[in-house]
Image: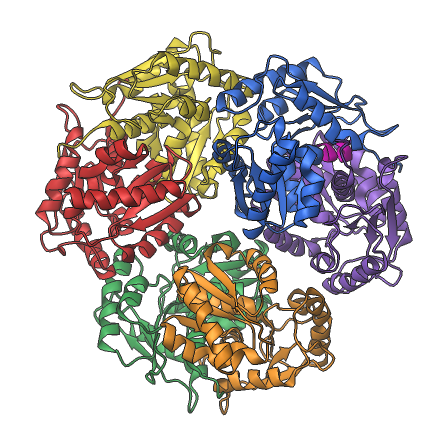
Chain colours: A blue, B purple, C orange, D green, E red, F yellow
Amino acid sequence: MTSTASGPILVINPNSSETVTEGLRQALSGFFFAGGPAIECVTIEHGPPGVVTQRHVDEAALHTAAVIEARPDAAAYVLACYSQPGLDLARSITRRPVYGIQDAGVLSALALADLFGVIAVAEGSIPRHLRNLRRLGVDQRLAGEVALEGSVSVAESGHGEESYGLLLRAAEKLKTLGAGAIVLGCAGMSGHRRRLEDETGVAIIDPTQAAVAMAFGNLVTGSA
Amino acid sequence: MTSTASGPILVINPNSSETVTEGLRQALSGFFFAGGPAIECVTIEHGPPGVVTQRHVDEAALHTAAVIEARPDAAAYVLACYSQPGLDLARSITRRPVYGIQDAGVLSALALADLFGVIAVAEGSIPRHLRNLRRLGVDQRLAGEVALEGSVSVAESGHGEESYGLLLRAAEKLKTLGAGAIVLGCAGMSGHRRRLEDETGVAIIDPTQAAVAMAFGNLVTGSA
Amino acid sequence: MTSTASGPILVINPNSSETVTEGLRQALSGFFFAGGPAIECVTIEHGPPGVVTQRHVDEAALHTAAVIEARPDAAAYVLACYSQPGLDLARSITRRPVYGIQDAGVLSALALADLFGVIAVAEGSIPRHLRNLRRLGVDQRLAGEVALEGSVSVAESGHGEESYGLLLRAAEKLKTLGAGAIVLGCAGMSGHRRRLEDETGVAIIDPTQAAVAMAFGNLVTGSA
Amino acid sequence: MTSTASGPILVINPNSSETVTEGLRQALSGFFFAGGPAIECVTIEHGPPGVVTQRHVDEAALHTAAVIEARPDAAAYVLACYSQPGLDLARSITRRPVYGIQDAGVLSALALADLFGVIAVAEGSIPRHLRNLRRLGVDQRLAGEVALEGSVSVAESGHGEESYGLLLRAAEKLKTLGAGAIVLGCAGMSGHRRRLEDETGVAIIDPTQAAVAMAFGNLVTGSA
Amino acid sequence: MTSTASGPILVINPNSSETVTEGLRQALSGFFFAGGPAIECVTIEHGPPGVVTQRHVDEAALHTAAVIEARPDAAAYVLACYSQPGLDLARSITRRPVYGIQDAGVLSALALADLFGVIAVAEGSIPRHLRNLRRLGVDQRLAGEVALEGSVSVAESGHGEESYGLLLRAAEKLKTLGAGAIVLGCAGMSGHRRRLEDETGVAIIDPTQAAVAMAFGNLVTGSA
Amino acid sequence: MTSTASGPILVINPNSSETVTEGLRQALSGFFFAGGPAIECVTIEHGPPGVVTQRHVDEAALHTAAVIEARPDAAAYVLACYSQPGLDLARSITRRPVYGIQDAGVLSALALADLFGVIAVAEGSIPRHLRNLRRLGVDQRLAGEVALEGSVSVAESGHGEESYGLLLRAAEKLKTLGAGAIVLGCAGMSGHRRRLEDETGVAIIDPTQAAVAMAFGNLVTGSA
């Protein structure tokens, strides 16, 4: 954890979709300050179009590690996929801070509310997320995790009325279950965050923003 | 959680020590960006010189609430005392996000490591901290919490070789206990953070920086 | 925990309602024995009419502490409000035993049954209660907590057919959820205890009686 | 849980030692009030001299049940052995409240302190106690359980300087481990309670007194 | 845990039903190999026809112990009743491995799936099972336990279309609750295992087979 | 989980050491019965010589998946490496049962004892194991995990006096910590199992034997 690095916060999109990476850039644009840490979002070209299956996750782990090794200049790394492919591997090959967005998103939700909810893109990834919540040790504070009741791609999940409607329905359900903060369970949903927060009155956490905020806070130095 | 606020992140030092508040400003100076959220650190004039006893905590709760009510313009509030006086009360009187630095610090540590440690200023506050870790639901991931083996005031704890030596000894002990990240259990220790991180090789979390980073991430908005 | 005290068990009603205090006296009348520990119920005159909001709780903490300091003659203290205002503070200023009625009620329920339920006066206080159950470390044994489905004041909650009907409905629901013992989540519900127990066949715990029983047991001394 | 019973609180000593039963009577003498619930202590004549082995526990379960069936007049039952032989069986054959002294003692300790300790008569019974703490769901709040460092019978454990010295050493050790309240892990240690409390400054819980206090509180009725 | 025993795995049916014991033999017939460990299933003649009540459990504990003492030649013992009568007692009187089928079944389910479900013969035994899951420490991974919606004896539960239909309905419900593996909560249901597995697509665990498999694995020795 | 498969239990050694695979065959020879399930041990030729680093684990995940896809005839799969590379991936690509040896070993230990211990080959893998115990949800029952106090390869860990001495020392330490069963935390230690069990008097679990036993039990079918 040497702190002299002056390189960027490297935000790694482990899928091959430039659209998703561009969405990350937009989601993170609020962190771009003159004199602040640089934030760089990269795409893994030979990754899958979206990390959906467990195989995608396990393959992405190695791709992510390759990116990290190719970019030793970075001051911190953010794995911008809710399945956090290769988090343990990344930590084994660099001493810089590595953030996974599920961990960062969930932990940020717990800093605001007693119970949190999660909106998943698809039903199939919920068991994988629950395993990680057990690993993280905070599964007892989950109000619930619900999947969108319709088929939406990662890239589409943050844009358009249709996907917004699905997110709203999921958020309302989680509110009923007692969620005081809701984590968007996919790096692509970010575009709907503010509107969802305004309409539901519940704190909505974009996990990539949460992870970058943590990295940001880790890197800034006091003047003392 | 309305998101239209353009006011500052209000960092509330619940004790009356301007020295401590000035220390907070220095610790947070890295977050001051042109165009970024304003960060304002305030002292509670009629607070105790340091929040040490449970009475201090309970009295500070009401003082903190008064500050929050006097400053409805703030976009977010940070309770910059590791005992988080009035956290629940604050959340009951404002819909803006309220962060307690213990919660934020500990949760940020968990985003980096399997087990965390805490350095307390004094033995007497450890049971209070442990009660909060149970409330937070993450006590099972505590490697240990140790107090400085010497008498140091909150204001002194972040300056000088003597206090640094005490922090280093505590950090080394926590490392032995398995801590992969260490939270500074007092708002005043910030000045030693980088040096301690460099010399121990373990991530050191300043809890006020962690809380402000979370508030910062909560407020920044994407461009989408 | 010096044991030579011969003063009363001081039962502190942290609200200003003499009606509620009188209800406590009635609920505890079964503990009044010639030669037994005296039990004295006091009202905090400048307290709120009922402890409903978090502010009420935090203000009551200081009022309660003032009462404790004014009555060093007491042999034990009972905080007769389900939100236990000032429990930690009280313990920091006296070495006599201090009981909070939520803790005492819930722990007494666990001495009788596998899972317990709680009847709250109002929905709004449930999250606060849940936070305390996490602090207490027994949240996993909660079958459920339900609020009365109607608006009833603390003082009214233990009298009359209307409030009884609401309690009965809540108790039946908790029974369905698996509760083997039910805690009355308010100091004022006591009047309905026996009838509710007889009609539901489930153990009903009045938390003030439970706390006083614990204090009583703590004070009595064997003859050996 | 019918509440019309006017019979005694039946305290069942599951071993055959009249000395131990007489010790229970002395420990509980403080609960004997004119007009209060009667408290009757009975010995199981054909029980073992002390409940030491698991076989003793399992045999005592059936003996205890026989006593309960022979005494349907009792208003409540207390199983006055720290291994609580037949607790589940007892509850399956009577609708009156049944208290086991381990559960009651430990839960009463948690009403007073963050962490509790237990003093066991012998090393061999500790795993059995730990299994019950897991069943009870409060094992995470155990500071430690230590056995007396010397061989003492159940009947001797509450009398004489030698056994007192062993208890004191155990209590001091538990204090070091963070115990804020200490449960005497045997029905026979009661005679040393007050002295141990005075000398250690830590709350000492006699589990039989704790259980009878709970039963007492369960039976007393308000005047409303 | 001496390993030189060459005796059989003794499977103890703690009820007096030879039909049930014969069912166990059939369920375990797949483990009978020339040269493999012998597996012997015994009936407790003076046991109850079925272990249903808590008294049955507690009486069976002593009967089981008597069998174990009468058969010191056995290399391992399996308590073939889901209530595991006398498990702790058995372990206190022999150094050979002793398996209870609930523990073995549930732990085997956790080796296959994130969450497990249990099918109970009757509603009344569910609280007893839950107490054991807390003792075992895996209650948090229970998706649910449901009872057959009809009255079926232990002996009948593994044969015939009617009981199969009840098992199927229970299994489908548990699947909905998220169970990835389902434990048959009774030693008698074994006959339906394969069909239920094929029709639901969920792993079905016969707990006696699971326990014998563990004992089998414990006894086989490598050739090194 | 279709149960008609008649293929072998495929035991996959994810490293390239034929010596280790041969050791697995020896360890499992006790399961080879005429008429029993076939057990086949395979080496991943292009795997690392030993799975030591996190990269080894993540690469082995994909190799293991390739083996599983190449062998759809197998009736069950055992991942014979304590780090269980690719367990989730394996389960996503086959409906046959897949066992990881850490999970199977630990769960088998819990079927025999209150608390378990683990002997790791090297200190560095302990945090990885602890993460998995949290995922598995049984970390609270770990008495301790200790590494061999000397450098031994996976292949050597089960042979010779030197490695035996290291295992014995580790086992004695775990016994002191309360472990009632000890899991060999490496597929290669099997050769020392019986001797270690005889000399310590504590149940020693070879995790590969435990996993194969579970698979064996899963595959055998009753005659009903």
Q: Is residue E24 visible?
A: yes
* Count of marks overlaid on the render: 0
Quadrant position of the C terminus of chain C in the picture? bottom left
Residue A118: give x, y in percent of width and height. Answer: 57, 41
Quadrant position of the N terminus of chain C in the picture? bottom right
Residue at the image position 73 percent from the left and 49 percent from the top: B99
As rendered, which of F125 and C146 lies closer to the eye? C146
Residue F187: give x, y in percent of width and height. Answer: 39, 22
Q: Is residue C216 visible?
A: no
As rendered, which of F58 and B161 lies closer to the eye? F58
Check if residue B46 falls in the magenta segment.
no
Place residue F32 in its image quadrant: top left
Q: Is residue C206 left or right of residue A195?
A: left
Place residue F87 in its image quadrant: top left
Check if residue A214 falls in the magenta segment.
yes
Q: Is residue C122 above or below residue F143?
A: below
As rendered, which of B122 and C40 lies closer to the eye? C40
Q: Is residue B149 left or right of residue C178?
A: right
Q: Which residues are magenta?
A: A212-219
Q: Is residue A177 above or below residue B143?
A: below
Q: Is residue E5 above or below residue B10?
A: above
Residue B217: give x, y in percent of width and height. Answer: 75, 38
Q: Is residue B51 left or right of residue A178?
A: right
Q: Is residue D83 above or below residue A16?
A: below
Place residue C3 in its image quadrant: bottom right
Q: Is residue A46 left or right of residue D4?
A: right
Residue at the image position 20 percent from the left and 36 percent from the top: E75
Per the picture, the main secondary structure of the magenta-coloured stretch is helix
Residue A153: give x, y in percent of width and height. Answer: 57, 27
Residue at the image position 62 percent from the left and 22 percent from the top: A90
Residue found farthest to the front: A161
